[in-house]
Amino acid sequence: MECIAQINGRKVFYAHVDEAKLPAHFPVENVCMLAVADDVSKEKLQAFSDAALVKNVKYFCAVGKDRDALEFAFDTSSIEKHQFVMTTGHDDLKEAVWFASKVAYHEKDEITALVCIIVDNDEAEKRRLIDAIRAVESGWEPAD
């Protein structure tokens, strides 16, 4: 996992996962996680969500074709583990990055980092995600 930017005082990390396994070393606590999922099986989405909950995720944003299934999987995992994590689903990747870095918050713990994960190993998605992060880092905001 590498730190690729800083937006709104939050370090922005990027990683991709295979087989729903998150990186063993999570460099931060109190994380907002943004996950991109396109054409991923429900089983893999559920395994990813289960793994993410043990990483001290305070806010979760889902984006991509499978955003609804991913958000549902994360909600299911959090209920089963008796953890409350706010979740949101987003249609647009750039708007999701903006929201996760500028708006998402936790009422008790300050979110100190945004961890962006691509749930499948898609190089085109990686480029789109990096471009969205760079745009928001440069001041891009959604239109009213």
Image: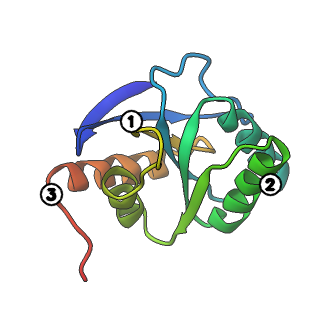
Q: Which amino acid lies under the numbered mark 3 shown in the image of this protein?
A: Gly
What residue is rendered at 41% in x and 55% in y? 104
Q: Residues within 10 Å of mark 2 (few under 14, many from 20)?
A: some
2 and 3 marks in contact (CB < 8 Å): no
Task: Estimate the spatial distance between the alpha carbons at disc 2 and disc 3, rounded to whole Å.
Answer: 35 Å
3 and 1 marks in contact (CB < 8 Å): no
In the rendered image, residue 117, in percent from the top left (x then y), is placed at: 52, 41
Q: Is residue 62 left or right of residue 1?
A: right
In the rendered image, residue 27, in percent from the top left (x then y), is placed at: 46, 20
* Disc 2 secondary structure class: helix
Q: Residue 53 lies in what quarter of the image?
A: top right
Task: Estimate the spatial distance between the alpha carbons at disc 3 and disc 1, rounded to whole Å.
Answer: 18 Å
Q: Residue 72 lies in what quarter of the image?
A: bottom right
Q: Label 1 belongs to which residue?
A: 113
Answer yes or no: is residue 40 visible. Answer: no
Task: Estimate the spatial distance between the alpha carbons at disc 2 and disc 1, rounded to whole Å.
Answer: 24 Å
Q: Label 2 belongs to which residue?
A: 76
* Disc 3 secondary structure class: loop
Q: Is residue 69 left or right of residue 108?
A: right
138 vs 10: above or below: below
What residue is rendered at 70% in x and 29% in y? 21
Q: Earlier in the sequence, mark 3 or mark 1?
A: 1
Q: Earlier in the sequence, mark 2 or mark 1?
A: 2
Q: Which amino acid lies under the numbered mark 2 shown in the image of this protein?
A: Thr
What residue is rendered at 40% in x and 54% in y? 100
Q: Residues within 10 Å of mark 3 (few under 14, many from 20)?
A: few
In the rendered image, residue 26, in percent from the top left (x then y), is placed at: 52, 22
Q: Which amino acid lies under the numbered mark 1 shown in the image of this protein?
A: Ala
What residue is rendered at 74% in x and 47% in y? 78
